Amino acid sequence: MKAQQFAEHLGTQYEGKDFVLDEFNRECVVIPLEVVPQCFEFLRDDYATQMDYFDFSTCVDRPPDRMDLVYSMYSTVHRHRVQFKVILDRNNACVPSIAHLWENANWNEREIYDLYGVFFPGHKDLRRLMMPEDWEGHPLRKDYAHPNLVVRPD
Amino acid sequence: MDLIKKIPAYIERIPNGGILMTGLDWVLNNAKASSMWYMLFGLACCAIELMATGASRYDFDRLGMIFRATPRQTDLMIVAGTLTLKMAPRVKLLYEQMPDPKYVIAMGGCTMHGGPFYHDSYSVLKGVDKIIPVDIHVAGCPPRPEALLNGCIALQDLIRGEKVGRKRDRPGLRHVDPSTNLPLLVRPDTGLIRPNQILMPDQLRVLS
């Protein structure tokens, strides 16, 4: 299955929701934030998709007000790999956790929380993964400024 | 016999043997310098060069250097690699767990001043000597095994110059020029290896 078929398949499952392809990456389906945990559970368990392998999830910071969460998934049965994108509000970045569906999403979500400051309700252990425990701020946000940063001279 | 001639000692031969008189400093310092056990500990790509130096081609063992997997049995800490701010308290803890006398070799550019991570990095400690006193700096990114061996020999020379029973003047922590935020000369007393000095092959002494 290609991303276009994924979008149509999800559109028949969730009536009234809009599943479109990403404007840049045509193998990427944009998923509405409202259906996030149920939609991924459906993608994992449905016979036609069977996305049983969670590659990774990452985040793209797009200031001033947008933040994209990207999931990459693979089906070892059907051998198709598709990416999914959830568009968040940058000032209130919050998306339900999917760590109960795929175990390895656990550390991916901790990393995104650590570096981008996206909050994952439903995550059992949302601590910082890479930065020290008492670190302030989320370094991969575009507007992050560290007080001791030595800027490279031009 | 050549080795015997190098010892600063008085030798008197008597039947069935001889009497050798020498200084306590020489004996104890040589014992110490010839069995520098270092901690099995690597942080980044410099650790690969450290492993290469420990392997058979360059062979740390001929300097009496054997790695130990616990800080409580080591004399020398070779900080090999980028030290991140998260790792820094752990490295300081490991250093404090080592028994005296203890020495530190800072290996590579990252451990001196952050190296390639000096600019635009929020998570790298810009110099190990901000948290632990460093005896020898070995420049390079990463240093070749010859450079590390040279640093170890420089450390042995440093140990041989010590006085038994006298407190060692341990190198202090980093002195930073406040205007430029660049390190000053690291060891003003001996000036063994300066932070930005790259060791050239002709500076490497031949191991005999």
Image: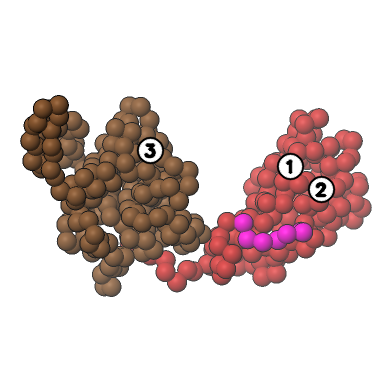
Chain colours: A red, B brown
Callout 3 environment at 10 Å: few (<14), some (14 to 19), or many (20+)?
A: some
Q: Mark 1 lies on which chain?
A: A
Instruction: Tell me the CA gap for discs 1 and 3.
Output: 44 Å
Instruction: Judge depth for marks 1 and 3 and give the one in front.
Output: 3
Secondary structure at badge 2 equals: loop
Which residue is under mark 1?
A54
Secondary structure at badge 3 equals: loop
Secondary structure at badge 1 equals: strand
Which residue is under mark 2?
A101
Question: Residue B150 appears at what percent x and percent y?
Answer: 24, 41
Question: Residue A102 appears at what percent x and percent y?
Answer: 78, 46
Instruction: Tell me the CA gap for discs 2 and 3.
Output: 48 Å
Residue B151 in view in this figure: no
Instruction: Please report contact status of discs 2 and 3: CB closer than 8 Å, yes or no.
Output: no
Question: Residue A113 appears at what percent x and percent y?
Answer: 65, 60
For the image shown, how many numbered marks are present on the structure? Answer: 3
Using the image, determine if residue B115 lies above or below residue B199. below
The amino acid pointed to by label 1 is Phe
Q: Which chain carries label 2?
A: A
The amino acid pointed to by label 2 is Leu
The residue located at (67%, 56%) in the rendering is: A110
Which residue is under mark 3?
B66
Instruction: Please report contact status of discs 2 and 1: CB closer than 8 Å, yes or no.
Output: yes
In the rendered image, the quadrant that contains the N terminus of chain B is: top left
Question: From which residue to which does the magenta span run?
Answer: A123-129
Callout 1 environment at 10 Å: few (<14), some (14 to 19), or many (20+)?
A: some
In the rendered image, the quadrant that contains the C terminus of chain B is: top left
Q: Which of A70 and B190 is in front in this view?
A: B190
The residue located at (48%, 47%) in the rendering is: B70
The residue located at (17%, 33%) in the rendering is: B206
